[in-house]
Amino acid sequence: MAKNERDNEKPKLKRKAYEKELRRLQAELCVLQDWVKHKGLRVIVVFEGRDGAGKGGTIRAITERVSPRVFRLVALPAPSDREKTEMYIQRYLSHFPAAGEIVIFDRSWYNRACVEYVMGFCTKEQHRRFLELCPLFEKYVVEGGITLIKYWLEVSNDEQERRFEARIADPLRQWKLSPIDLPSREKWYEYSRARDMMLKATDTKHAPWYLVRSDDKKRARLNCISHLLSLIPHKKPPRVKVRLPKRSNKHKYDDQATLKGRTFISERY
């Protein structure tokens, strides 16, 4: 039996068990956060995958309990007319981490390898040139002291279809449908070939790709966070014990009475 078939037979993860393990991992992410600040580390985490692969949910699980000043999320819109005339990588470089930062790219310079190539937003020559230069660029980044971690979330054809149908039917999810989501659904095999070319050219020793099976969202999130924590050696840094000071009565006055007549919102709940 193939490995992916065995994975599909795993029992559904109960919500209580998922939330308990997620909380444990998120607590460890807080430790990692303190260590990154303490050591002045610079980390980039790239999330790529087909539309509907679960990138957003995985990123939210990572960033939910940590500081946005340390775990900084970058999700760039389509390039402006000015940015289209810049060197391709230029718009991403300005978001790279300083000391004590982990930058998470929700899609990255790899737009050129998949979305732009499949949807015809770049030429074949630009695509070829990107695949040629990208490993060299990433080698420079890694040798410059930045930890570069790249995740590809792999969703199956049936599950992507199910998620797109859910977005169409649910008003609370319709905002997730971008103008290229539905056309990308038609181009499943074109995306597969683009993925394969990307992995062949850019899955290097200095910046490897890590693939995450994402049909089961809960398991994908837990697996990804656990793997991320394993890639960055860390421990609890020394910390000064915090004590909450007592309120001083110096300059005491009735600070609630002074709010009388101000406009408070209606308490409907």
Image (tube, rainbow, N blue to C red):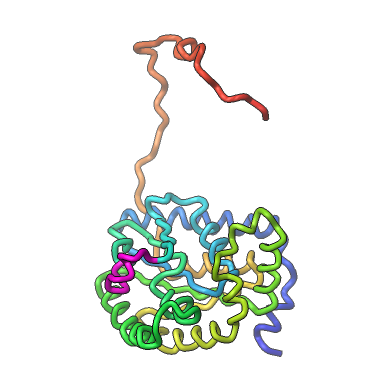
Up/down of 6 relative to 54, above or below: below
At x 43%, y 70%, the residue is 231
- Please tell me which residue lies in front, 183 or 104: 183
| Location of residue 104 in the rendering, given as x and y in whole percent from the top left corner | 42, 63
Relative to 265, 112 lies left or right: left
At x 50%, y 87%, the residue is 196
**Quadrant in the picture for the C terminus:** top right
- From where the camera sits, is residue 204 visible? no
- Please tell me which residue lies in front, 222 or 244: 222
- Please tell me which residue lies in front, 224 or 161: 161
At x 70%, y 84%, the residue is 5
Look at the image and say whether residue 92 sits in the magenta stretch.
no
| Figure quadrant of residue 169 | bottom right
Look at the image and say whether residue 89 sits in the magenta stretch.
yes
Up/down of 7 relative to 125, above or below: above
At x 34%, y 70%, the residue is 147
Relative to 210, 171 lies left or right: right
| Location of residue 19 in the rendering, given as x and y in whole percent from the top left corner | 64, 55
- Which segment did they paint magenta? 79-91
Figure disc tally: 0
**Quadrant in the picture for the N terminus:** bottom right
Magenta stretch, main secondary structure, is: loop
| Location of residue 179 in the rendering, given as x and y in whole percent from the top left corner | 55, 67
Up/down of 211 relative to 60, above or below: below
| Figure quadrant of residue 142 | bottom left
| Location of residue 77 in the rendering, given as x and y in whole percent from the top left corner | 43, 62
- From where the camera sits, is residue 192 visible? yes
